[in-house]
């Protein structure tokens, strides 16, 4: 809502500062949001108390203006463009690269992401405590630049561990098989020796 005043009417209202202050207090708004009817300047000038001002408000001679809209639509549009990479060239930058986004902050973020993943995997029993500690220290040593690389390393280490376990099991099985074979061979040999000894022994004398 806009209000247009004639030059003469503004001169008439120049002496209504008291009424404006009282109206602002009654309406609970700033003095800039109080509108006094310029055609009723004389009547408004007679009001010298809050009670009189309340009566003028009731009659519509004093009005509280609406809050002026401070639109953020242009700001939002600008920020959307910045997300796409616009308005971020050398001419728009203040401060060094490290001042704009410190290396320490990037390092802390990366470490927190990696350590969170390791904790999650340990709680889910995907990795044991030994592998957790090994990978934790490797992360601290800047070996993994992001979560994807760490996950690939975990899968690779787990695959190697499973392969090693399978090979050990196969070696153990071969060892047991060879042991059983040698035991069977020894038992057969012992049985042959026993049979030969029994056959070669002289028969007992029937007369005696």
Image (cartoon, rainbow, N blue to C red):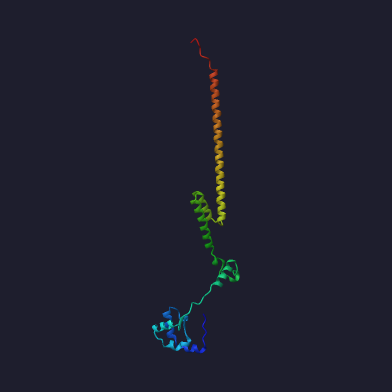
Residue in the foreground of this view, choosing between 162 and 71: 71
Image: 199 above or below 86: above
Residue at image position (55%, 48%) is 158
Image: 123 above or below 187: below
Residue in the foreground of this view, choosing between 129 and 22: 22
Q: Which residue extends farthest top?
A: 207
Mark count = 0
Q: Is residue 90 visible?
A: yes
Q: Position of residue 125 (x, y in %)?
A: 50, 49
Image: 150 above or below 166: below
Image: 164 above or below 47: above
Residue at image position (56%, 34%) is 177
Q: Position of residue 53 (x, y in %)?
A: 41, 83
Residue in the foreground of this view, choosing between 37 and 196: 37
Quarter of the view holding residue 28: bottom left
Residue in the foreground of this view, choosing between 148 and 45: 45
Q: Is residue 140 visible?
A: no
Whether residue 58 sits left or right of residue 113 in the image: it is left
Residue at image position (41%, 83%) is 55
Residue at image position (55%, 45%) is 162
Q: Position of residue 203 (x, y in %)?
A: 52, 14
Q: Position of residue 134 (x, y in %)?
A: 52, 51
């Amino acid at each position: 809502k806009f209000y247009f005043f004639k030059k003469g009417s503004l001169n008439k209202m120049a002496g209504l500062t008291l009424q404006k202050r009282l109206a602002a207090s009654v309406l609970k708004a700033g003095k800039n949001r109080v509108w006094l009817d310029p055609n009723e300047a004389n009547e408004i000038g007679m009001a010298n108390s809050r009670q009189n001002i309340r009566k003028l408000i009731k009659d519509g001679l004093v009005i509280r203006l609406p809050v002026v809209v401070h639109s953020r639509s242009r700001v939002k549009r600008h920020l959307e463009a910045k997300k796409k990479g616009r308005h971020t060239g050398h001419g728009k930058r203040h401060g060094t690269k490290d001042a704009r986004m410190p290396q320490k902050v990037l390092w802390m973020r990366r470490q927190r992401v990696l350590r969170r993943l390791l904790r999650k995997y340990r709680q889910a029993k995907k990795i044991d405590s030994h592998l957790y500690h090994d990978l934790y220290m490797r992360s601290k040593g800047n070996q993994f630049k992001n979560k994807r690389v760490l996950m690939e390393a975990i899968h690779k280490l787990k695959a190697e561990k499973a392969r090693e376990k399978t090979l050990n099991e196969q070696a153990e099985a071969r060892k047991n098989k060879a042991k059983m074979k040698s035991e069977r061979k020894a038992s057969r040999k012992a049985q042959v020796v026993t049979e030969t000894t029994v056959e070669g022994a002289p028969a007992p004398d029937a007369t005696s």
